[in-house]
Image: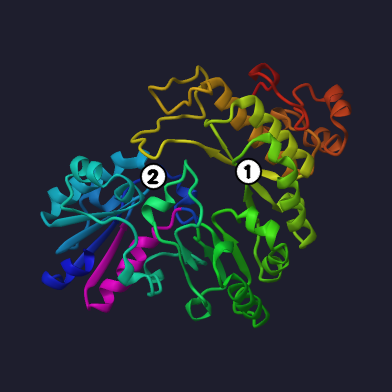
């Protein structure tokens, strides 16, 4: 659709806009939030001799200081529950410029009819813009020290809570990526990197590029498919040799899968990764209740690995006003709470995860809110950091034990 619009319209200037999503300023250029779709569209438009300007976070739109008159506007979207920010941006653009506005991205692809109706945009683009896929994103528009690569699109799995197969229904893969490399730090946006038929070739390319000092860092935004890792454990060593950092796997199933998860973690450890580098995605506020999820967390502690916080929201959720700072709690009117969970359990589990991860990173046997907030002396905190929990508890009143199952919020007051 974008190709057709550009072809039939006399477009000389295009404005690309990233709405003012609730992202902390320090994370604006974080690998998880770069508007890669807009950067690819920019490369495509420039190949057609169209002048492009990127606006991020609406600042110039809101202030009215933008000195650019576009013939068309492209607006990106992220999560469905951030749809209101997209709506606000589209309305600003329609009012200020009076030209066609196209919305693409995750929300647009998952809920196109809702997007068209609520935002008032002229067109909705669903899924990937194929004509731009082979182009290198326009990194001149942003200030980052990394590049984003897709060696695959889609996924071979059909996991219920995931919308990948709706946005990218066909699983496609590349045989080579070496000609795409322009920076030393690479972030893979693949949904299932290891499922690539040519993953060994890709990894060997990365190994050679690393030897030639053309790259020095690789990371996968998504987790590695542990089922593939179990079948092909040699891939773990190739991941390590190619420079991958902070590997992640997923534990979506029941506690009974613990032996299988342990096997996956051990493959990564035997490949040269430290346990503290490894993370496990766990989906909570979903079908598995708190008690079983907390047992899974304790098992992750035994493995010495971190946990990636994944609070579930339905794919059709159009709001999420959860606030981690609320002391009095919230209800399902504020955010999605699964019938098998409570607001109290969600908050407790998030605190447990955070404290767990701090202990893993520090190599500590306990977590103390007072120590983190420097309410007790640093010397006292350091003195007992490597002590066992029982010893630390005698001297640090609010010491919290990551190896213990925590049943209710009274066991972890922060």
Disc 2 crowd rating (10 Å Cα; few below 14, some 14-19, many 20+) is some
Residues rendered magenta in the picture: 33-55
Q: Is residue 175 above or below residue 222?
A: below
* Depth order, front residue of 181/341: 341
Q: Secondary structure at mark 1?
A: loop
Q: Is 195 contained in the magenta span?
A: no
Identify the residue position indicated by label 2 in the image: 79
Q: Position of residue 84 (x, y in %)?
A: 29, 39
Residue 361 in percent (x, y) is at: 72, 46
Q: Residues within 10 Å of mark 1 (few under 14, many from 20)?
A: some
In front: 136, or 369? 136
The residue depicted at 67 percent of the width and 66 percent of the height is 239
Q: Position of residue 321 (x, y in %)?
A: 40, 30
Q: Is residue 149 left or right of residue 18?
A: right
Q: Which residue is mark 1?
A: 251
The residue lying at 25 percent from left, 68 percent from top is 52
Quadrant of image for the C terminus: top right
């Amino acid at each position: 659709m974008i190709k057709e619009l550009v072809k039939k319209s006399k477009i000389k200037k295009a404005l690309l806009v990233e709405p003012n999503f609730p992202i902390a300023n320090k994370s604006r250029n974080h690998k998880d939030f770069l508007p890669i779709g807009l950067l690819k569209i920019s490369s495509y438009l420039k190949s057609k001799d169209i002048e492009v300007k990127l606006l991020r976070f609406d600042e110039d739109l809101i202030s009215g200081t933008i000195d650019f008159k576009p013939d068309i506007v492209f607006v990106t979207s992220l999560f469905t529950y951030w749809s209101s920010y997209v709506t606000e941006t589209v309305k600003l653009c329609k009012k200020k410029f009076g030209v066609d506005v196209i919305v693409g991205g995750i929300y647009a692809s998952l809920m196109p009819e809702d997007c068209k109706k609520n935002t008032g945009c002229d067109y909705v683009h669903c899924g990937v813009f194929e004509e731009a896929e082979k182009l290198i994103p326009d990194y001149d528009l942003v200030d980052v020290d990394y590049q984003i690569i897709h060696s695959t699109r889609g996924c071979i799995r059909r996991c219920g809570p995931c919308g990948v197969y709706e946005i990218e229904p066909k699983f496609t893969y590349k045989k080579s990526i070496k000609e795409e490399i322009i920076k030393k730090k690479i972030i893979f946006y693949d949904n299932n990197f290891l499922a690539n038929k040519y993953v060994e070739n890709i990894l060997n390319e990365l190994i050679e590029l690393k030897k030639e000092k053309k790259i020095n860092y690789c990371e996968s935004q998504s987790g590695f498919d542990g089922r593939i890792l179990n079948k092909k454990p040699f891939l773990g060593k190739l991941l390590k040799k190619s420079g991958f950092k902070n590997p992640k796997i997923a534990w979506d199933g029941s506690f009974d899968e613990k032996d299988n998860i342990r096997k996956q973690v051990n493959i990564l450890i035997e490949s040269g990764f430290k346990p503290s580098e490894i993370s496990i995605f766990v989906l909570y506020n979903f079908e598995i209740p708190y008690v079983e999820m907390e047992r899974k967390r304790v098992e992750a502690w035994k493995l010495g690995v971190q946990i990636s916080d994944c609070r579930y929201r339905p794919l059709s959720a159009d709001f999420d006003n959860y606030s981690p700072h609320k002391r009095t709690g919230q209800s399902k009117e504020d955010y999605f709470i699964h019938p098998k969970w409570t607001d109290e359990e969600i908050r407790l589990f998030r605190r447990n995860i955070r404290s767990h991860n701090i202990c893993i990173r520090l190599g500590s046997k306990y977590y103390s809110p007072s120590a983190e907030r420097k309410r007790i002396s640093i010397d006292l905190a350091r003195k007992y950091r490597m002590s066992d929990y029982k010893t630390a508890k005698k001297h640090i009143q609010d010491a919290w034990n990551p190896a213990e199952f925590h049943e209710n919020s009274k066991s972890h007051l922060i």
